[in-house]
Image (spheres, rainbow, N blue to C red):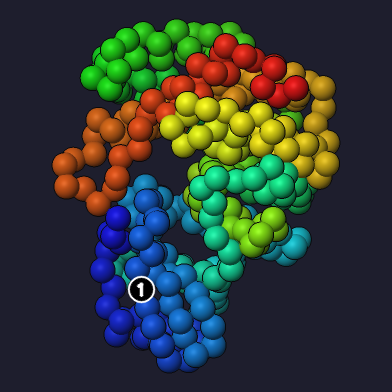
Amino acid sequence: MAVYTHVSAEEIGRLLDDFDLGPLRSVKGIAEGVENSNYLIDAERGRFVLTLYEKRVDAADLPFFLSLLDHLADRGLPVPRALSDRSGAQVRTVQERPACLIEFLPGVSLSQPTPAQARATGEALGRMHAALGDFAGARPNALGPDGWHELATRCGDAVDAIAPGLAARVAGELRALSEAWPRDLPRSVIHADLFPDNVLMLGDAVTGMIDFYFACTDIRAYDLAVTHSAWAFSADGRSYDKVVGRALVSGYAAAFPLSEEERAALPVLARGAALRFTLTRAWDWLNTPAGALVTRKDPLAFLRRLDAYAASGAAMFA
């Protein structure tokens, strides 16, 4: 896709003046973004990313996100800070949208991670959770269990146009998860969206963890379950790589030990993660107009994951 909002080179050059970064040398839109408009900027004093926050990111949440990134970066995590301009402001207005100029991190996103790369990602997630132990910020998870019920209601029976019987399948899973969802596991701020495209790597080393715009306060082990659902399956959800899944969990546990209660809850938490992305993708599938810049993602890819977790349970985390 292309960026949502066009920003001229002249406007970006004027913005750089306020950050004392020297003249603009080059700029191009980053096509991979799906939530915001992103530009890769080369200036005299370095490389940066300009992000314009589109409608899915509430400007009122930006102080939370930016303080979270600063907190993690201060503790040595590979996350990109937002720069401050000469007045100390991190959030600017560009083309009537809130915008930040963000550090550029090297690395590439993976489409087929190896076990070694999955283990490194698990370790990075565990280190992130350890670093958040003294983070004071909090943000509700709008896409937690209550949000799933709301989203399922809003989608209604229209999801049967995606797959016959999907509405009934979702309703049954919501009932099952309402009964089984853990209520007393440790909570913290979590990333909640650590897909392979939100991790930058050079070889087997994690060089960046990015796109924290779904970060929220929720069950800590749920973050691992979300990551497992994203990393351990093929993109279409038809095949599960148990070696990659095991490497991810073992890497996490090496950096931040899991309690027996957290390990026991992973199958249920993973079912919840798979349902969350089934529902959000279904909503987007039904409500993305023809010709939109966003490419719709297949909800059934996560329904297949949901079916796998429901069928195999703890065996997928053994």
86 horizontally vs 267: left or right = left
Relative to residue 248, is residue 61 depicted above or below? below
The amino acid at mark 1 is Lys
Q: Nearer the viewer, residue 316 or 139?
A: 316
Q: Which residue is mark 1?
A: 28
Relative to residue 301, is residue 15 depicted above or below? below
When asked about the image quadrant of residue 10, the answer is bottom left
- Numbered disc 1: secondary structure: strand
Q: Nearer the viewer, residue 317 or 71?
A: 317
**Residue 32 coordinates in the image, percent (x, y):** 40, 56
Residue at 71% in and 47% down: 116
Q: Residue furthest left?
A: 290
209 horizontally vs 17: left or right = right
Q: Quadrant of the C terminus?
A: top right
**Residue 115 coordinates in the image, percent (x, y):** 69, 42
Residue at 46% in and 22% down: 304
Q: Quadrant of the N terminus?
A: bottom left
Residue 61 in sight in this render: yes
